[in-house]
């Protein structure tokens, strides 16, 4: 076969086309479906778009380059200010990234302003004086040295307030005789650690003269001499009452006692001692007390003891008349 010059030129052109195609596309096995487009592909695509534009007479749509950086949503300084102050913004402003407040943690300083960790801090305007919602209370030192506390005054002597209409106090107690101690309310008394001494005795000797009135079942409870507690010296704390001493001493001696608190008289009422109760020896029987040979006209919880007092609890079968209560003999009522 005769090789002509034109055939050689055609073959050379064909080979050159194959080489260019091979170099532009690369080996088939090195290309993967997931590989990003190369600069040659992009050039060919641009040429195709240019040819298409030339043929149609319109400008091709340009695709925006895709980057690996994630888009960041930013808030302008103006928007941040308006958000913190409660104002609304009509349009967004374009600002530099250095002017953007990117993080506003939920922490506050002592003055109530927000603290921003990154970017320029957003600062609220200073609080005006008189705005109590933003200000903190502060103590103002008093001029001069603080005044010394006044010395506690000595407690005043107990006194009774008598209603002129009824002639009694609010606990239905008549005025006490001159020279006798007035009642001290339990809630007003102060018990100290100072110890004092007094004398205590408990007797039901009056029953021995009224055995015909006594409940037969209670006869064995009455001592032969009628003495339940013989006179003894007892120790008490300053501020204690007759009732406090009786309750403690009978408990110490393991002698039965039963009482009832009576708010009307603001005192405890002794119902029974040594299982001998009121009304066990007649309808006028019951327990009474006297201090230093005087029968107080108020309850034992209101009688505040003093050093050396002599306390006697006695059982009466005649509303006190049989045990020497002159008040009862004159027509008074038994408390």
Image (spheres, rainbow, N blue to C red):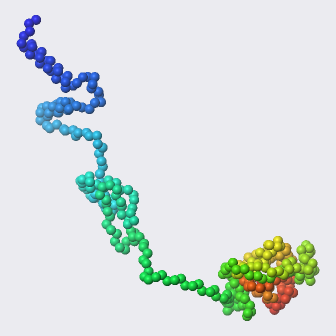
Whether residue 244 is situated above or below residue 328 in the rendered picture: above
User: Is 35 left, or right, of 12 in this rendering?
Assistant: right
Whether residue 51 is situated above or below residue 185 in the rendered picture: above
Spot the residue most to the left: 5
**Image quadrant where residue 266 sits:** bottom right
Give 146 or 210, whichever is nearer the viewer. 146
Q: Residue at x 19, y 30 (%)?
A: 40
The percent coordinates of residue 77 (x first, y second) are 28, 57
**Image quadrant where residue 257 sits:** bottom right
Q: Residue at x 29, y 58 (%)?
A: 120
The reply to whether residue 266 is visible in this rendering is no
Q: Residue at x 78, y 82 (%)?
A: 198
Q: How many marks?
A: 0
Spot the residue most to the bottom: 178
**Image quadrant where residue 170 sits:** bottom right
Give 99 or 263, whichever is nearer the viewer. 99
The percent coordinates of residue 258 (x first, y second) are 79, 74
Q: Residue at x 62, y 86 (%)?
A: 154
């Amino acid at each position: 076969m005769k090789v002509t010059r034109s055939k050689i030129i055609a073959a050379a052109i064909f080979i050159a086309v194959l080489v260019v195609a091979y170099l532009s596309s690369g080996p088939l096995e090195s290309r993967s479906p997931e590989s990003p487009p190369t600069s040659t592909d992009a050039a060919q695509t641009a040429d195709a778009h240019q040819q298409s534009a030339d043929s149609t007479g319109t400008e091709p749509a340009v695709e925006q380059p895709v980057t690996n950086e994630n888009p960041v949503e930013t808030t302008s300084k103006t928007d941040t200010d308006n958000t913190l102050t409660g104002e609304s913004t009509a349009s967004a402003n374009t600002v530099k990234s250095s002017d953007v407040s990117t993080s506003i943690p939920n922490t506050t300083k002592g003055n109530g302003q927000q603290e921003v960790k990154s970017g320029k801090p957003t600062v609220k305007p200073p609080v005006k004086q008189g705005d109590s919602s933003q200000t903190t209370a502060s103590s103002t030192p008093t001029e001069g040295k603080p005044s010394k506390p006044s010395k506690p005054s000595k407690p005043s002597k107990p006194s009774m307030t008598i209603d002129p209409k009824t002639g009694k106090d609010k606990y239905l107690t008549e005025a006490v005789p001159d020279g006798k101690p007035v009642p001290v309310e339990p809630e007003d008394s102060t018990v100290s650690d100072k110890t004092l001494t007094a004398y205590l005795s408990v007797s039901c000797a009056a029953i021995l003269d009224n055995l015909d009135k006594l409940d037969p079942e209670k006869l064995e409870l009455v001592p032969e001499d009628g003495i339940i507690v013989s006179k003894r010296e007892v120790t008490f704390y300053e501020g204690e009452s007759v009732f406090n001493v009786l309750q403690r001493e009978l408990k110490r001696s393991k002698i039965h006692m039963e009482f009832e608190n009576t708010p009307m008289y603001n005192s405890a009422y002794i119902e029974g001692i040594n299982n001998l109760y009121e009304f066990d020896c007649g309808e006028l029987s019951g327990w009474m007390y006297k201090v230093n040979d005087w029968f107080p006209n108020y309850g034992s919880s209101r009688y505040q003891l003093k050093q050396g007092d002599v306390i006697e609890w006695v059982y009466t079968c005649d509303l006190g008349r049989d045990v020497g209560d002159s008040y009862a003999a004159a027509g008074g009522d038994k408390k």
